Amino acid sequence: AMASQDITAGTVIVQCLPLAHSLFNPPTNLLTEEENYGDENRRCARCFFSERNVDETTVARKQKFGRCSKCKVAFYCSRSCQEEDWNHFHKLECQYYSKRRKKSGNAPNFYATNAEEDAIPLLLRTFSALKILRDGNQQSPGESLNNEVLHDDLVSCGPDHFSSLMVSSEHIKPSQTETRSSALSGTSIKIAIDIMEKFAIKGSVYDKPQRDKNSAANSVWGYNNIVDDKRAAFTLHQSIERTLNAFKKNNFGIVDSLHSPFGEGVYPCAALLNHSCAPNCILRYEFGRKVGSKFQLPILQIVACRNIVKGEELTHSYVDLALPTVERRARLIGTHGFECKCIRCQKNGCCLELPENRGEWALWPLKHKFAAMEDKSCGSLSTKLTEVDLDEAIVGCHAISKNGESNIFWQAQQFEQNAEECLLEGNVAGELCNLSQGIDLFAPKGDVWFSPFHVQLYSLRGKYFAALLTNGLVNDAIAECEHIVSFLAVAFSHVEHHPLLGLQLFTLGDLYSEASSNQDSNELMALFKTKAELAYIWAKEI
């Protein structure tokens, strides 16, 4: 996909509706006990709006989401969302959950023993959407809303777009021999196929109305329509395997404002964009937009994260940009089958300026930015700087062997696991102590030095910060949030407007504001107020 005109940073280039979408499966021990499935976990299965965001000002939504009485898995924010989801997506998924539970003797942990089984709910939701589109006697979910109130900026893809999604070479053409993976021979997929076949022959408009239900189900996927050699044809199982492979390579993890994934979506239009670890676009999502009397599906927005010139290719990252090159490349090869050779993946391809004295690195990005904002004429210019490769900044260490480094990582993981156990036991002091000890592992000791922006340290700080906030320890939380902002400023230094940095800056500003109101000293109160203003200004720039 190429830019047809110059695009300014922050511009929403296109907004896409999903062909199908699905929340990740809830914890299996909560599926049969609604009272244990708290509002912090509930999202509407159709519009993905969160129950925690519903208040007295929210129009047309229930204060407490309703649950599907049949499968007891899906929640809905409103009657309209439940009806729309049933008609377009949930009907087949609901049958699957109900039958799977019955097969397992009503056990709560009745599904998801492998990745293929985990994908079955989305597989069935996609099948349902494709069936509706191919029959042509109903509108797609997006069209039914867009016809009520016209939204020209929303893009909705058809079934042929889905059939043309990129897949691995072994799935491009049908195999002459039927070789089923073990995952497609289990109870779960057999239930799903039976549901597909029965649904495929209901009210269908096919060129051969009398065809068997297996062929009818296969026609819904539509892969045989794009095969050049008509002597070869996909079987239903091959079509399902191709679909699962297309999911793996093209689906989008739907994330919340903290970039934590909670669902996935099939967005064929957005899948046209190629990957770069130094992208000019980022993705964000909008949930629960009201359109007429109904709520819109989760909207994927492709946003320019820097100025883009006409004719430039539009790219976004398929992997977490905060990861070092070795891990990004491994994930791209494992999931998408290619080795990235973008500028970010080249040695010294992306560099940033940091103090020549590494002892000054900690919190330097935050302090330098604040100083520059307060006095643009000098702003930390007295510090001697040097160019540092981005990978060196986020995984660098000194005077420690590979075995010693691995041992530090192992110990850090043990402290994290201990903290999680303490959390489950309600031992707050133990949780905080273990996370603090994990962070201390990365502190300089003699000649041994880890970068203060090390990605493993960032992971620990994120958990420690969350624990501090939960327990109302604002001052300690501020210190950790400052480190997190500094890490993100370094890790995303090659991405001008990354929303995660902006979000963390707003959080830091809020913490500074709260701290200012708790100070006895006027001087400290003024200091925190100034820091809050600077954090908000920086966040708004992003």
Image (cartoon, rainbow, N blue to C red):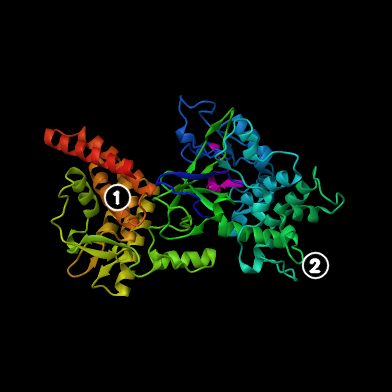
Q: Which residue is mark 1?
A: 485
Q: Secondary structure at mark 2?
A: loop
Range drawn in magenta:
20-34
Q: Is residue 374 rendered to the left or right of residue 216?
A: left
Q: Is residue 82 above or below residue 99?
A: above
490 magenta-colored: no
Q: Amino acid at mark 2?
A: Arg
Image point 56% across, 60% down: which residue? 249
Q: CA distance from mark 1 to mark 2?
A: 59 Å
Give the image location of residue 351, x and y in percent: 30, 63
Is 24 inside the magenta-drawn segment? yes
Dot 1 amino acid type: Val
Give above or below for 325 relative to 283: below
State whether residue 427 appears in this view. Answer: no
Query: Residue 399: percent from the left, percent from the top?
Result: 23, 73
Quarter of the image for residue 212 reads bottom right
User: Going by the image, does 205 lie left or right of 377?
Assistant: right
User: Which residue position is annotated with label 2?
Assistant: 231
Q: Quadrant of the C terminus?
A: top left
User: Which residue sits at x=35%, y=53%?
Assistant: 419
Label annotation for residue 367: none
**Position of 501 relative to 277 (above/below):** above
Between 254 and 1, the one nearer to me in the picture: 1
- Quadrant in which residue 187 is drawn: bottom right
- Tag in front: 1 or 2: 2
Q: Residue at x 68, y 52 (%)?
A: 160
Of pointers 1 and 2, the one earlier in the residue sequence:
2
Query: Viewer-proximal residue, 275 or 209?
Result: 275
